[in-house]
Image: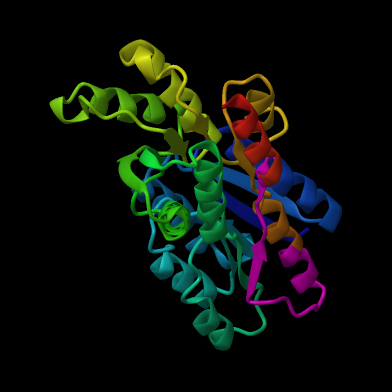
């Protein structure tokens, strides 16, 4: 049975757990063996994990590696070594700038980039901010790791679509709940945060948003009515938090690891797969509904 290795960021985040579950389900449907490895958000550990499979004896190598990278450069060196060893490479939520070159080098291997349209995620978050604070103001953004492609693309989209009347302050976490709390709490202790009162706290995933809200309650209770938005929008994650009033809005992003594994299965039976698959996010609640709720609250 052909094997696919799926490399993910960490096992502490609900979205990453869903990625793993979807990868396993897709492998079962495609008749593939799958091994999921988590990198604990450590770029060096992730490289070591993947090179272990790349340098395995020929008969023990996987048919493909599907990986969501910790670093922003997309593990290009690892990818090139994998392809030269006859291992397919499925980049998950990366920039994919080197994918075409790999496909030209080895057209017989499953090689592609499967990603959420993260620039559109940022644009949706900007429209949510404008709906929640039509008069403009200060926006505090808690971003994922600054070197991560998804985080930078989401921030690019947010800046692009936010428009005039808003000033953006960006803090960095690492996608975990603890990092969202730590980033906000550390900044709130600084003198430079005094006098800063955001109209919205826009967080790049729901897990960090939970931590950010905890920091607000502990260190800046006067912000208790400031809307907090997140992203990922899992049914029992962000969507539940929105329904409970813990978050003002989230963005539903489809999981990508399962899609990548499914593409490997199709490629292994002779189907030519596209070099890039982009999956569309959506606002929860829908943007027009969010605007009506915000107007009603005022």
Position of residue 100 measured from the top left corner of the image (x, y, whole percent)? 54, 82
Name the residue: 58% across, 82% down.
103
180 over 264 or under it: above or below: above
Position of residue 282 measured from the top left corner of the image (x, y, whole percent)? 67, 49
- Tell me: 149 left or right of 254: left
Q: Nearer the viewer, residue 266 or 157?
A: 157
The stretch in magenta equals 263-287
The quadrant in which the C terminus is found is top right
Name the residue: 39% across, 59% down.
72
The quadrant in which the N terminus is found is bottom right
| Magenta-colored stretch includes residue 72 | no
Residue 3 falls in which quadrant of the image? bottom right
Q: Nearer the viewer, residue 212 or 148?
A: 212
Name the residue: 36% across, 15% down.
222
192 over 35 or under it: above or below: above
Name the residue: 48% across, 66% down.
95
* Residue 110 visible in this rendered orientation of the protein: yes
The extreme bottom residue here reads 104
The extreme left residue here reads 191
| Magenta-colored stretch includes residue 268 | yes
Q: Nearer the viewer, residue 195 or 273?
A: 195
Position of residue 91 measured from the top left corner of the image (x, y, whole percent)? 56, 63
- Tell me: 188 left or right of 19: left
């Amino acid at each position: 049975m052909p094997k696919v290795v799926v490399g993910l960021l960490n096992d502490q985040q609900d979205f990453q757990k869903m990625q793993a579950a979807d990868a396993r389900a897709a492998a079962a449907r495609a008749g593939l063996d799958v091994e999921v490895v988590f990198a604990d958000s450590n770029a060096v550990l992730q490289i070591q994990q993947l090179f272990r499979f790349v340098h395995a004896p020929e008969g023990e190598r996987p048919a493909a590696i599907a990986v969501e990278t910790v670093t922003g450069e997309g593990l290009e060196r690892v990818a090139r070594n994998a392809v030269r060893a006859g291992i397919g490479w499925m980049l998950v939520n990366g920039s994919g700038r080197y994918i075409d070159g790999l496909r030209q080098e080895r057209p017989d291997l499953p090689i592609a980039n499967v990603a959420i349209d993260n620039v559109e995620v940022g644009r949706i978050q900007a429209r949510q901010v404008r709906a929640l604070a039509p008069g403009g103001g200060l926006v505090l953004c808690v971003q994922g790791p600054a070197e991560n492609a998804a985080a930078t693309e989401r921030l690019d989209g947010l800046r692009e679509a936010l428009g005039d009347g808003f000033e953006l302050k960006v803090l960095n976490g690492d996608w975990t709940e603890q990092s969202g709390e730590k980033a906000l709490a550390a900044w709130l202790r600084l003198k430079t945060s005094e006098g800063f009162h955001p109209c919205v706290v826009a967080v790049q995933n729901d897990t960090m948003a939970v931590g950010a809200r905890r920091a607000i309650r502990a260190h800046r209770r006067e912000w208790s009515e400031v809307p907090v938005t997140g992203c990922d929008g899992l049914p029992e994650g962000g969507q539940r938090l929105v329904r409970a009033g813990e978050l003002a809005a989230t963005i539903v992003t489809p999981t990508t690891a399962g899609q990548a594994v499914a593409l490997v299965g199709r490629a292994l039976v002779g189907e030519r797969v596209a070099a890039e698959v982009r999956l569309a996010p959506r606002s929860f609640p829908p943007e027009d509904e969010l605007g009506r709720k915000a107007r009603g609250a005022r």
